[in-house]
Amino acid sequence: LVAYTAAKAMVNSISKNLALLLAPEEILVNVVSPGSVASEALVGWARSVGVDDSDGVDPYRLMEAIAEHFGHSSQLPRAGLPDEVGAVAAFLASRRNAYMTGANVNVDGGSDFT
């Protein structure tokens, strides 16, 4: 966890500095910080600890397993979906985002509140 949080802090710091450096060129630099997202890796972990059903891993059951095994979860009672993170990334990379730079956008179901 120490290495992960140090690397995440570095990414945020570099992005802020790049946003400042590239602002005169109108180049936007932002970070997306996803929380517990039902990615292939997280779903694989959930299956390894017995969270599964015939239709795959339910995002509500996935969040319950995260809370049970890691002691924390998000404020929302379910894991995020990859498309939910993708929608934020797509917005940030689109022409609709014309004025946001240097931001760290948490797509984490409120897990940074705890």
Image (spheres, rainbow, N blue to C red):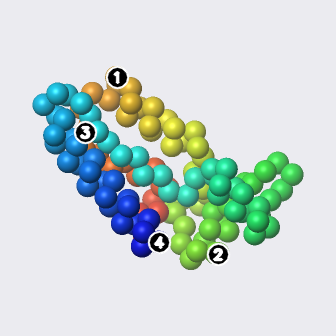
- Going from N to C along the chain, the mark reached first, 4 or 3, is 4
For the question of whether residue 81 can be seen, the reply is: yes
- Going from N to C along the chain, the mark reached first, 2 or 4, is 4
From the image, tell me which residue sits under label 1.
95
Q: Is residue 58 above or below residue 64?
A: above
From the image, tell me which residue sits under label 4.
1
Residue 92 place in picture, x, y as percent: 37, 34
Q: Is residue 69 above or below residue 38?
A: below
> Are the residues tagged 2 and 3 within 8 Å (C-beta)?
no
x 80%, y 59%: residue: 52
x 69%, y 56%: residue: 43
- Going from N to C along the chain, the mark reached first, 1 or 4, is 4
For the question of whether residue 61 can be seen, the reply is: no
Task: Estimate the spatial distance between the alpha carbons at disc 2 and disc 3, rounded to whole Å.
Answer: 37 Å
Q: Quadrant of the C terminus?
A: bottom left
Q: Is residue 17 above or below residue 61?
A: above
- Quarter where residue 112 is shown: bottom left
Task: Estimate the spatial distance between the alpha carbons at disc 4 and disc 3, rounded to whole Å.
Answer: 28 Å
**In this image, 31 relative to 21: left or right?**
right
- Quarter where residue 46 is shown: bottom right
Label 2 is placed on what type of residue?
Glu
Task: Estimate the spatial distance between the alpha carbons at disc 2 and disc 1, rounded to whole Å.
Answer: 41 Å
**In this image, 16 relative to 82: left or right?**
left
- Going from N to C along the chain, the mark reached first, 1 or 3, is 1
- Going from N to C along the chain, the mark reached first, 2 or 1, is 2
